[in-house]
Amino acid sequence: MNVASVVSAAPWRWPRWGAGGMLAAALAGGLLIAVQAGAVPVTLADWLAPFQAGDEALSGGAYVLWHIRLPRALFAALIGAALALAGGLTQGLFRNPLADPGLLGVSSGAACAGAATIVFAASLHVAPELRVWLLPAAAFAGAMLICVLLDRVARWATPGSIVGLLLTGVALNAITVAVMGLCIYLASDDQLRTLTFWTLGSLSAGSWRQVAALLLVLAGALWATRYLMRALNALALGEAQALHVGVDVGRLRTQVIVLVAVLTGFAVAWCGGIGFIGLIAPHLVRTWLGADQRRVLPLSMLAGGLLLLLADTLARTVAIPAEVPVGIFTALLGGPFFLMLLRRFRHGTA
Amino acid sequence: MTPLLELSFATTQLGQQYFGPFTVRVAPGERIAILGPSGAGKSTLLKLMACELQPQAGQVVLAGRPLAQWPLADLARCRAVLPQGSNVAFGLQCELVIGLGRVARLVDPQLERIVQDAAALARAGHLLGRRLDTLSGGEQARVQLARIFAQMWDVRDGLILVDEPLAALDPGLQFDLLDSLQQFCATRGHAVIAILHDINHALLGFERLLLVRSGQLVADIASDAGAVPALAALYGIALTTATSSDGHVCVIPARSAVRRAA
């Protein structure tokens, strides 16, 4: 064991090239498989088409590749990375490998605000070019609202206690589920279809514009995370212990919560409810490479991207030309995984 | 000489139970043991000293500055706290846990050497590279003590607060670690305040005793043969004084007359 690399004071631990390289290579391979898979075959010539003919003239396989599959594959990988980072941050904050933004009510807060927008904003007069951003903005606001409430209520009711925060999350989750139910009750038939599809989770909204926006969000989140990782390591010792070694736990909690809200808000807004990526990816990395957050958080972004990319490719191709909502796949994969984790956790090996 | 730590009429309340007022002055480099029956408020007193609990009345002053006014990172560079039994999440590696004692230092070029030296001093050198959650209770206690050593390694005249550091250890290791702690504090001028269960450890390694009962400080006395009657009264037991083979005062506990009658 190389003690030097483990104990260094660096806020940022570059992953061992082996692990990081393997994950990056797997992700690149996954992207290639994802763009090849589908009803329309893609050839090598299609890759070169935009450079020869220009963007407007693309047709057939080249159009499918450059305007549909490639942005969608990248979008899936980026959303997976965002979900995994949000999950890893949440687990670090709660000192619990079973935590997930879903648990805090953040995901359902975002979903609930999105649903309310779909149902109630239909009659609203919004300029068409702004309409595209209405749902993301609402879901983001919902996630933030839940996060702020969570923080305020938990601090007022049970100051400093993480169990209190969790229970507050459970209560807020129940309220968002009720509001969601109200939205479904009041929705028209068309809206109901949109709501159902959206709550099941789908990556079909992926476009170059969203890929670019997500890249910016993820880069910002990673930048903000870099000094939180050592503090999150210290938090694993316990809240009081983290205070004693000089970590401002209150501030750390606020920072982590805001980051989780931003990441979850964007993911839910554009993809609906895609569960379990945030639970599985950090856990796989921890099991593989140990629990140092400086390694877990960056690498689980790669792992989460890979997982969601594979799930989405499966969802697109399993019943061509129809598309199964990817949330169903991640839930089918994640549910049993969660139970297995629970069993291992009980035996103290998680 | 200005006291390192000064509690003036500090009180706190946990549920229905009141603790204090505690008034204690700790000089730099002092070695103090806190003794008392279970539930007497020993840990509460230590938490007041550690800034983990805020006093409801009175105040706690460290190095001339009220504890609540210290920035956390500065505080972490001059006092270390080892709580009773801790639960570390995620199975971190031992060297990482020890290194976390120094997380408040943003630039720390000596970290690697200090972690290894601190581990060696706490008899945990052979545990580096292993996951903390795979260790026994006694091994974990040594790693945690090494973390405290690492935190205070390159500091002088600091304060170390420990809650039952020796509880999970075998008798040989108890002596070893007591010696390590004493040597560590003596060479750096650190004061140490330790909650102990074993009266003999308190008599052996500490120069002053704080006796706590029912949330009150009942005695603040020198740690020598003269303290034995107060200790017997504190626990409600009989204590026979003896001299150990290495020439130290030690006590042999027995049931008191009152307990025998009951």
Image (cartoon, coloured by chain):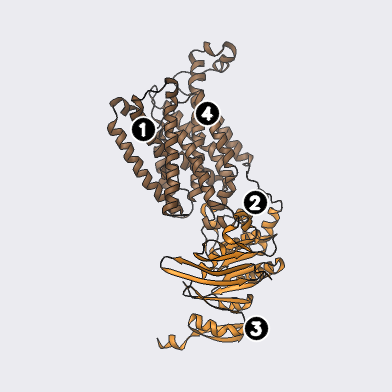
Chain colours: A brown, B orange
Q: CA distance from mark 4 to mark 2?
A: 36 Å
Which residue is drawn at the image coordinates 53% and 33% (left, top)?
A217
Where disc 2 sits, the SS reads helix
Q: Earlier in the sequence, mark 4 or mark 2?
A: 2
> Does label 1 lie on the same chain as label 2?
yes
Question: Is disc 2 surrounded by few (<14), some (14 to 19) or many (20+) residues within 10 Å?
Answer: many
Q: Quadrant of residue A328?
A: top left
Tell me, yes or no, whether the two marked residues, 2 and 1, touch with CB atoms within 8 Å: no
In the rendered view, would you say B246 is above or below A334? below
> Does label 3 lie on the same chain as label 2?
no
Q: CA distance from mark 4 to mark 3?
A: 75 Å
Which circle, 3 or 1, is nearer the viewer?
Answer: 1
Which residue type does callout 3 highlight?
Ser
Q: Earlier in the sequence, mark 1 or mark 4?
A: 1
Looking at this view, is A329 or B23 the one in front? Answer: B23
Tell me if residue A253 can be seen: yes
Question: Is disc 1 surrounded by few (<14), some (14 to 19) or many (20+) residues within 10 Å?
Answer: many
Which residue type does callout 1 highlight?
Ala
Place of residue B155 in the rendered image (x, y in percent of width and height, measured from the top left): 69, 60
Residue bearing the label numbered 2:
A7
Identify the image quadrant of the N terminus of chain B: bottom right
Which circle, 2 or 1, is nearer the viewer?
Answer: 1
Which circle, 4 or 3, is nearer the viewer?
Answer: 4
Residue bearing the label numbered 4:
A213
Residue bearing the label numbered 1:
A115
Residue bearing the label numbered 3:
B245
